[in-house]
Image (spheres, rainbow, N blue to C red):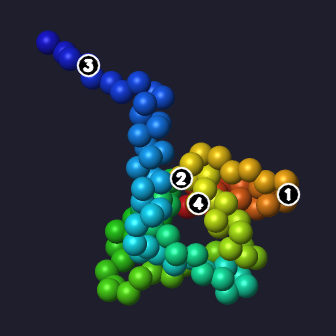
Amino acid sequence: MLYHLENETRDHSVGLKLALKDWVGTEPDLVIITEDGSKVYTKSIIFSMYSKTFCNLMADYKSLEMPHISLPVSSSGPVMNLLKVLTEGIVLSTDSNALLEVGKQEKFFSEN
């Protein structure tokens, strides 16, 4: 006999979103450095969920020091907006270029 248990899609999405938001408020384990030298402290699991390559990279990282990753982005704004998209599913801006930059960063992680 086969049994089937499934979360409602909306409930599942809400649960994932809440879990990701909870991760944002915890102790960071990753530093992202931008071209202007700004540092964004975050949780690696947020990016690991969206990138198999990133997940494998973090799994292989054995140092006791917090990993630092440099991204080809001019400042911390696009990184913060990307984190917002990944954790909340949405980011709003009156600057269309800011959103284009988020799309470029998201593509970087999704292709790698």
Q: Is residue 78 left or right of residue 57?
A: right
Cα–Cα span, label 3 and label 4 = 34 Å
Mark 3 vs 1, N-terminal side: 3
Cα–Cα span, label 2 and label 1 = 20 Å
Mark 2 vs 1, N-terminal side: 2
- Residue at x-position 56% and y-position 53%: 86
Q: Where is residue 4 in the image (x, y as percent from the top left)?
A: 26, 19
Vertical side of 38 occupied by 82: above or below: above
Helix, strand or loop for disc 1: loop
Q: Is residue 68 left or right of residue 62?
A: right
- Residue at x-position 40% and y-position 72%: 27
Helix, strand or loop for disc 2: helix
Q: Can residue 48 be seen in this view?
A: no
- Residue at x-position 41% and y-position 40%: 15
Circles 1 and 4: CB atoms closer than 8 Å:
no
Helix, strand or loop for disc 3: loop
Q: Residue 95: which disc?
A: 1
